Amino acid sequence: MSNKFDVIVIGAGPGGYVAAIRAAQLGLKTACVEKWSSETGKVVLGGTCLNVGCIPSKALLESSHKYEEAKHDLDIHGISADKVDIDVKTMLERKDGIVKNLTGGVAMLFKANGVTSIHGTGKLLAGKQVEVTDAKGDVVTYEADNIIIATGSKPVEIPPAPLTEGYIVDSTGALEFDEVPKRVGVIGAGVIGLELGSVWARLGSEVTVLEAQDTFLSVVDQQIAKEALKQFKKQGLDIKLKAMVTGTEIKRGLVNVSYKDGKGNQELKVDKLIVGVGRSPVTEGLLSADSEINLDERGFIFVDDRCQTAVPGIYAIGDVVRGPMLAHKASEEGVMVAERIAGHKPQVNYDCIPGVIYTHPELAWVGKNEEELKADGIDFNVGVAPFAASGRAMAANTTAGMVKILADSETDRVLGVHIIGAGASELIAQAVIAMEFGSSAEDLGLTMFAHPTLSESMHEAALAVNGNAIHVANRKRRK
Ligand code: FAD
Ligand code: AMP
């Protein structure tokens, strides 16, 4: 094998593997370096997302949702299920099977598209060289005209709660409990903490979430966040805000968690503690001293809006650079960079990145929220359609939540869409498309939606922006 490539990608997560496949599709001789090894020593492709992130968490969220529905939500339909049991082992095996399928699929795509897979830890040297060290310690140096760094992120660890096998775990450990713990503590009411907390709460654990901030989901539109807090509390998640974890101790098979809240020092005893306080970029050992790649003040690789680093021909994408840590954002950046290397001129629209929290109800949003628009001094109109007014939501017994649309009061252009409700992760795609096409609220209102669907709430919210809704309250007077 020649050691010279057109493109070398470091990291095979949703950023890196997608970039590598797209580059190869465009006729570029491409290699992808990945350090992750299976128990049998084989390379593991797919990164955080496929192995320990998006996919396994969604598998467990689906399983636990089905259990909860079978246990609590069938009566209303006149269905009784007397004996609903959980077999955690089968649940985890199903999850692992899905992961295996998908990661094996990436290996097949590499083969089909002619991407050379290199197993080892990559280090960027000066002169666009990548030194790869394999599990045995053997070192090979490769060269490329273009290098894409896609080394992703890892869970943040905090001194008061050091990971302790069997007791204090990060998000990866929280996907592997082999039985349902009686009591689970979660540090951090972010996306990961809420999703994983929900999984174990649905399966029967008493879950307490400790969050240092006094605002719940501060990045989310606060009308939506308030509704979410209400729903999660109703489900039995004990969410404590302004609760800063200060220490932990393992005693008699339990984790004693110390935290400080508005009233002083508090204690919580749990069987398992999940640390979900965010993720940090992976750059240790990645850059040689003379690589000339800069990091920003938070440790992310510094790039421009085309993912170009300070060195021409060296790019960085995904969780290792600024922006939301999301798989689809990483993949879109991967495609953009591969296509730019091939001479095309694509761009990523950073104003149109959907965010989702896969709880029940789900939260999903795109664009600006009410607080951001106010801070920016932009005048806007609001249309809100509660799912309580939707026939389809009633039929499905999922009437919690709403669709909220914010549109510029002068131009009517849609500036943000915020949803809480069942199926929000799918509904948000309509809003992303509308915003990508520069839609006005009126355009959405003039579009026909099938009846009865949850999507009709998008239609009603769009109509409500300009006071024309039929089934829900209009904030503006009808013209
Ligand atoms: P990663 O997926 O982290 O991949 C980086 C790869 O690079 C890894 O395979 C790593 O082994 C490899 N690597 C690192 N350093 C080197 C090196 N020096 N040499 C060789 N290889 C190297 N996002 C969503 O969009 N939706 C979700 O539902 C979602 N759920 C999540 C749930 C959980 C529990 C977690 C933890 C994350 C979730 N995310 C979700 C976030 C998502 O996983 C990340 O945003 C995404 O994986 C980032 O992709 P990436 O390619 O940048 O990095
Ligand atoms: P995210 O970055 O979205 O995954 O969210 C992580 C959350 O963890 C943030 O809301 C932080 O405020 C919270 N957090 C970080 N450190 C602590 C701590 N010591 N105690 C409680 N919450 C914390």
Image (cartoon, rainbow, N blue to C red):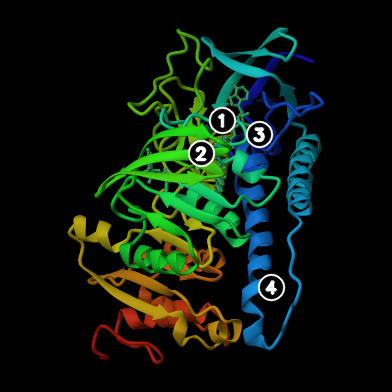
Q: Which mark is residue 255?
A: 2
Q: Which mark is residue 164?
A: 1
Q: Disc 4 versus disc 3: distance between alpha carbons?
A: 43 Å
Q: Disc 2 versus disc 1: distance between alpha carbons?
A: 10 Å
Q: Depth check: 102 or 209 in front?
A: 209
Q: Nearer the viewer, mark 4 or mark 3?
A: 4
Q: Amino acid at mark 3?
A: Ala
- Residue 367 position (above or below residue 79): above
Dot 4 corresponds to which residue? 70
Number of other residues with Cα within 10 Å of mark 4, as a class: few under 14, some 14 to 19, many 20 or more: some
Number of other residues with Cα within 10 Å of mark 1, as a class: few under 14, some 14 to 19, many 20 or more: few
Label 2 sits on a secondary structure element that is strand
Residue 438 seen: no
Dot 3 corresponds to which residue? 20
Please report contact status of discs 2 and 1: CB closer than 8 Å, yes or no.
yes
Q: Nearer the viewer, mark 3 or mark 1?
A: 1
Q: Amino acid at mark 2?
A: Val
Q: Nearer the viewer, mark 1 or mark 4?
A: 1
